[in-house]
Image: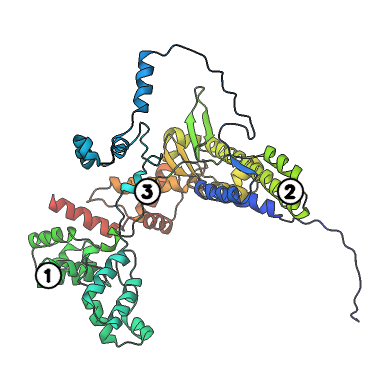
Amino acid sequence: MALSPRLEFRQAQSLTLTPQLMQSIKLLQLSHLELNDFVDAELLRNPLLEREDGSEPGEAEPAEAPERSTEISAYEDTVERGERIQDADSIADGYDTAVENVFPDQAAQDQLNPTSRLDRNGAGESGEAPDIDQFVASRPLLSEHLEAQANMLLRIPADRMIARHLIDNLNEAGYLAVELGSIADLLGAELGDVEAVLGALQGCDPVGVFARTVPECLAMQLRERDRLDPMMQALLDNIDLLAEHNVVALMRAVGCDREDLADMLAELRQLDPKPGLAFDRGPVEAVVPDVFVRPGPDGAWQVELNSEVLPRVLVNRVYYASVAKKTRDAAEKTFLSDCLASANWLTKSLDQRAQTMIKVAAEIVRQQDQFLLHGIAHLRPMTLKMVAETIDMHESTVSRVTSNKYMATPRGLFEMKYFFTTAIASSDGGGDHSAEAVRHRIRQLIEAEAASDVLSDDTIAALLQKEQGIDLARRTVAKYREGMNIPSSVIRRRQKKNLERVG
């Protein structure tokens, strides 16, 4: 068969994502913080966009009412006269002298209250109210705090370079995350020099930074307090037994009785296993809900968007019309047309995003009505596909809408993804159970168990089968238990017995 070029016509359908459509898809998955940042960038780029301030763009200012000659009361005359009175500085300047020479009491008050020179709205001389952030002390970063100490401890430039690399390789808890040999190879330095610099830095504040393990971090803090005796060192060497709550083996390894062990454990509780977390912490940011769910007067649920976090923008068509009349250059006309099309599409996309969020949230509330009424035990299994088919959308659209979005309900604040859980079939022919509800029941069974009757994973699976007809394998119970950071039955039995002995 010979190969030869030829022309061929074919007719086919295909979906092409235009830049505007890609922008709309991107807006769906943005959180309200990211969305506001995106809109702010568009406001700077597009001169036809402006934030909605409650009035229509281009709306004429209301005409001022004509002044009426009315009689001024004594109170109004007093207020106007007081506003015309000059302050102490102006009067002193008029006499070409200092304030304290004219008003000695005023100067003393200004020294005691330097922020007293504010107007009735709390604004200063610049006319703007003082920002509360200006009065908050800045917190140094861990790296800055350690570099300042390293510059005082180390005099040789090579040692300071090693110190900077050690500081750069600390994790947020203050632990050294790399091997010393790799730093020595990277800098072409001797391993002994790196160890010497590390030894000097381990005396920096906060005590415990530059440790490589938890026992080393605790040992550094105990050494600083002069409490690192051989028995305490033996306890740190066998800290894995402490994590397993194997008290008998721990006392045997340390060589102490129960009373001495209790005293040493009390000392360990006073230490900080993560000293670096005192630094590098940003401000605590509260989660702001995107959707509110409230019970209505008729018993139904009311779903509404949080209008406080949604950006509202308008297209200034009056400005567009005035500029378009004066535009003669083809490039300027093209730019203006593109700005108008982009502004129209952005406003349309924001409105479509809001409608889609309401639609998805309303369907979630409808399907999780029993959860809102009775709690987590009644959480229904729900998937993206179930919601998408009901509201006639694609699963990817529902996934984007529920990403990084939060819903405030009478049961608390939840991420919208929280309501999507897998289904666990019921063996007795009843309805399916939500995986989250099953985890909640497992936690309840473990919290209610006694020290003499600790439930194994097999026993928990049997109880779930007997109570609710949930057919769950032992390994699935173990996976759910480990996902909730609940130890095994052996460790729980030791913990409960130790608590009973202490009590």
Picture quarter containing residue 95?
Answer: top left
Residue projecting furthest to the top = 71
> Would residue 426 be found to the left or right of residue 195 on screen?
right
Question: Disc 2 residue type?
Answer: Ser
Say which element carries label 1: loop
Question: Disc 3 residue type?
Answer: Ile
Residue 397 position, x and y percent, is 62, 48
Tell me the CA gap for discs 1 and 3: 42 Å
The residue indicated by pointer 1 is 228
Is residue 109 shown above or below 336?
Answer: above
The residue that appears at 18% across and 70% down in the rendered structure is 220
Residue 399 appears in the rendering: no
The image's mark for residue 142 is none
Front position among marks 1 and 3: 1
Question: Disc 1 residue type?
Answer: Leu
Front residue of this view, candidates 372 and 110: 110
The image's mark for residue 337 is 2
Front position among marks 2 and 3: 2
Say which element carries label 3: helix
The image's mark for residue 442 is 3
First along the sequence among labels 1 and 3:
1
Front residue of this view, candidates 476 and 101: 101
First along the sequence among labels 1 and 2:
1
